[in-house]
Image: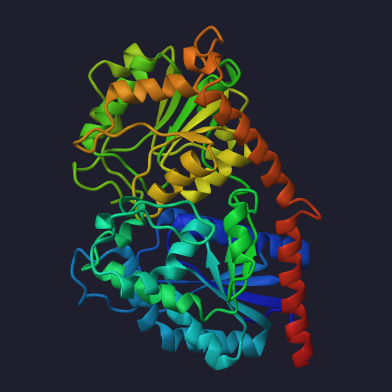
Amino acid sequence: MDADKDVVHVAVLPTPAMGHLIPMAELAKRLVSLHSISVTFITFAENPSIAQKAFLDDLPPTVTSLELPPVSLADLPPDATKLTRTSIATVRSLPALSAIISTLQKSTRLAAFIVDVFTTDALTVSKELGIPSFLFFPSNLLSLSVLLHLPELDSSTTCEYRDLPEPLQLPGCLPVPGTELLQPLQDRSNDAYKWMVHHGKQYRDADGILVNTFRDIEPETAKIMDDEKPPVYLIGPLIQSCSLDVESVNCSSWLDKQPRESVLYVCFGSGGILTCSQLQELACGLEMSGQRFLWVLRSPISDRESSAKYFNTTSIDDPFAFLPEGFLERTKKMGLVVPSWAPQKEVLAHGSTGGFLSHCGWNSTLESLLHGVPMIAWPLFAEQRMNALMLTEGMKVALRPVVATDGIYKREEIARVVMELMEGEQGKRVRELMEGEQGKRVRERVKELQECGTRALMENGESCMVITDLANKWRSTVTDKL
């Protein structure tokens, strides 16, 4: 609170999940290092994970954090989603948040307040205090477009979106079948859906929307968004600049021994896990493919839900106990299975990594693109089905296995798509790739977007210049008040 009054300051209120914290922190690092702007993260008291605490503690000294006092959520039903819990926690924290922002306003040159996609009710505080307010959107323009249009869709339709007779067609966007829309929109009777409609309305109250993407990913959508109100600022791709300080020698030394671009990296993000049945099918499919793999393995859950660990990544089970009998012994010459965590940025940057079987979380997607690694799309929850649609049908940087009628990806299909993407043991592609089919096009396209994304954040790149313009705008805002 005793910050240098000559330093421009920004406050942010993130959703308590690593997928939201990471890109917001990367924006904060750029503001600090390139524009001498200090940042305060305001966090919720409810059950912060060890990873979140470690992440915030590792930020630069000019990025500080303050914790809101706890609020009671005991009246919520046990099955309330994290989206609902975060939204209600935000509303109940408004008096305390107002006090914190007011204090920052008096003790620093507070130029802007940035909220997250599920903390939009906090915009009322900044509006009351006369502070420019912005929404940070951690995903892509397709998802943003859906949520901006959601209030209108809600009032003009009555059926579940999965029952819509035609795909949803928004201006400049890829057509989206109702079944592929964000998970919280799939049940209109759930409180999570009602909160999403509420947040979609609130987005319009921001003075600007900062989106973690770059123009070449969705050029037509970006063109439409150029005329959007409030203005949309493309500031990505912001990816984690370094992995947490966890031992990673095992992964690196193993990758060092593998041929170039021969390894399929298999990971479902910090929160995604598989059901028991699906884990078994994936193991068998990897073995059947005959391709090298590095698999980040987490203990499965029941066959009903695959997002249970999105906000709590601690597992008490031994994940290796759930693998098919003899799997580790049979695959020891071709694969490495590591429990719970791997240094993803380093793995994707390694020359031996040639593919990424991904849950299609947006952070992982951007990391894969910036390292030129093509993907196999395996969406689990949140907006990941829409991301998978973008990756395969729009951007064409991923292949997607066909799911069986029981909702499970079968081992034969997994093996097929892995072989289509990857190179064989002798450095030869399977027949489809040798004939210039889908896998080859995917590899070429991902290299193109790698160059575009890298260029966007370079000096004079579009995203870099947008961040610079915002920083200058915030600096002039507080200068005018002096």
Most foreground residue, 401 or 270: 401
Q: How is the image coloured?
A: rainbow
Figure quadrant of the C terminus: bottom right
| Residue drawn 81% across the image and 55% down it | 460
Figure quadrant of the N terminus: bottom right
Please, which residue is most extreme toward the top here?
426
Q: Position of residue 184 (x, y in %)?
A: 31, 61
Q: Is residue 174 left or right of residue 8?
A: left
The answer to whether residue 139 of the structure is visible from this angle is no
| Residue drawn 44% across the image and 63% down it | 146
Above/below status of 229 relative to 383: below
The answer to whether residue 413 of the structure is visible from this angle is yes
| Residue drawn 74% across the image and 61% down it | 33
Most foreground residue, 285 or 227: 227
Q: Is residue 209 left or right of residue 164?
A: right
Q: Position of residue 214 (x, y in %)?
A: 64, 53
